[in-house]
Image (cartoon, rainbow, N blue to C red):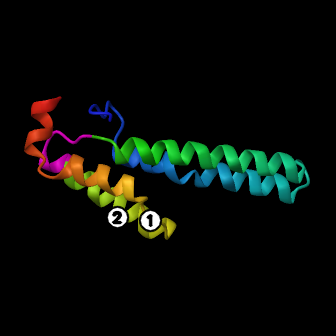
Amino acid sequence: MSRNWGARSFRNQGADCLGICTVHEWDERRAAGDVTNVVYAKALLEVTKEEEAARLRIVNHWPCNDQQGWQKLTYLAAYLFATRGSLKPEEMDAVLSTTEPVEWACALA
């Protein structure tokens, strides 16, 4: 599991996860007749793969303090509400193991 978040914030990761702008662009191109349905479907599949990878980076992130732990939990809650989705059981296990208790995660890093 990743233990280093790097310079990117949860807000930046959230923008990656939702991929709203990319999907909107492809919707417009398809509506204008600029792309075929096959090309459109392939593009949406790629967006879905990128979204899943970004979500997994957050799920597997090890926060180093309480603030990062709360940010992770808050972001995931907002993401799940916005997408009307849910975490897989293994993703939920990863979230729980990386956020409680927060204090020991830094000792492992």
Residue at the (34%, 64%) spot, across then down: 77
In this view, 86 is above or below 22: below
Calculate the distance from the C-alpha at mark 2 to the C-alpha at mark 1.
9 Å
Whole-percent x and y of residue 21? 62, 51
Whole-percent x and y of residue 99? 20, 50
Under mark 1, the amino acid is Ser
Give the magenta-colored segment's residue range.
62-68
SS type, badge 1: loop
Quadrant in which the N terminus appears: top left
Under mark 2, the amino acid is Ala
Q: What residue does disc 2 label?
A: 77
Q: Nearer the viewer, mark 2 or mark 1?
A: 1
Side (left or right) of 33 relative to 102: right
In this view, 4 is above or below 14: above
Whole-percent x and y of residue 46? 67, 43
**Which circle marks residue 9 in the picture?**
none
- Does 83 appear in magenta? no
Q: What residue does disc 1 label?
A: 86
- Does 66 appear in magenta? yes
